Amino acid sequence: MGKMRLEAFSDAVIAIIITIMVLELKIPHSEDIASLTALWPVFISYVLSFIYVGIYWNNHHHMLHTVKHVTGSILWSNLHLLFWLSLLPFTTGWAGENHFAKWLMIVYGANLLMAAIAYTILELRIVAEHGQDSTLATAIGRDLKGKLSIAAYALAIILAFLNPWISFGVYVAVALAWLIPDRRIERILAG
């Protein structure tokens, strides 16, 4: 199977995820600007999750540029990633509606952790199918940034028991670390 179908399906699912998230932003029933104040937690959670979905979409796009052929294990690994990303609208809305309470930051972090693990599994499946000397394997190397992100999510989940705002800060920090697109694959493909 060619990769175009996998890319098109993934892009469609990600577009739906973003659409569902934005639908969680409820329109105030007042014309008073102060009515927006009550929406700040939902808006902040939306912005953070939108950034995360954008990061995944961007890096997924670059990763698929390295794929020459798609196998069943790559398809299932991709679906695994999309499953965890598809839960982001739920965990985002829940966290925002309830002002980032402890258990919600734990659940949100677990969602981010599982998405990161699923992305890593997809990378590993692509490398396994294309070889250790493949473009993706060369580009990601030991993938220290990916491993540190997984560790940060796990730490943030634990820190949420102490203070959910600390874990929220870790989630923001990881997003900021990935906000600049990962250029490793671009450099390999260009060179």
Image: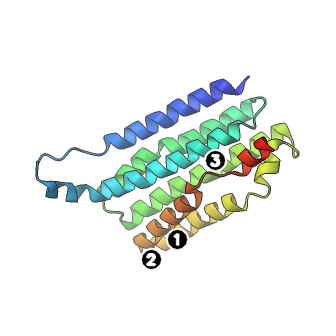
Identify the residue under disc 3.
118
- Residue at the spot 44% in from the left edge and 55% down from the top edge: 48
Residue under circle 1? 158
The kind of residue on which mark 1 rests is Ile
Neighbor class of circle 3 (other Cα within 10 Å; few <14, some 14-19, many 20+) is many
Q: In the rendered structure, which disc, 2 or 3, sits on the residue that comes first in sequence? A: 3
Indicate the amino acid at tag 3: Ala
Do the CB atoms of the residues marked 3 and 1 lie less than 8 Å apart?
no
List x then y, in percent, for residue 97: 30, 55
Q: Are marks 1 and 2 in contact (CB under 8 Å)?
A: yes
State which tag comes first along the sequence, 3 or 1. Answer: 3
Q: Give left or right: position of 30 versus 174.
A: left
Q: Is residue 62 left or right of residue 25?
A: right
Q: Residue at x 50, y 63 (%)?
A: 171
- Marks 2 and 3 close (CB-CB < 8 Å): no
Would you name the residue on which mark 2 appears? 162
| Drawn side of residue 132 relative to residue 122, left or right | right
Indicate how the structure is coloured in the image: rainbow
Can you give x and y, in whole percent of width and height, for residue 123 in the image?
72, 45
Residue located 31% across and 44% down the image: 24
Q: CA distance from mark 2 to mark 3?
A: 27 Å
Three-letter amino acid code of the residue under disc 2: Leu
Within-10-Å neighbours for mark 1: few <14, some 14–19, many 20+: some
The answer to whether 174 is drawn above or below residue 60 in the figure is below
What residue is shown at x 17% (from left), y 47% (from top)?
A: 28
Q: CA distance from mark 1 to mark 2?
A: 8 Å
Q: Position of residue 53 (x, y in %)?
A: 51, 46
Secondary element at tag 2: loop
Q: Position of residue 174 (x, y in %)?
A: 55, 62
Q: Quadrant of the N terminus?
A: top right
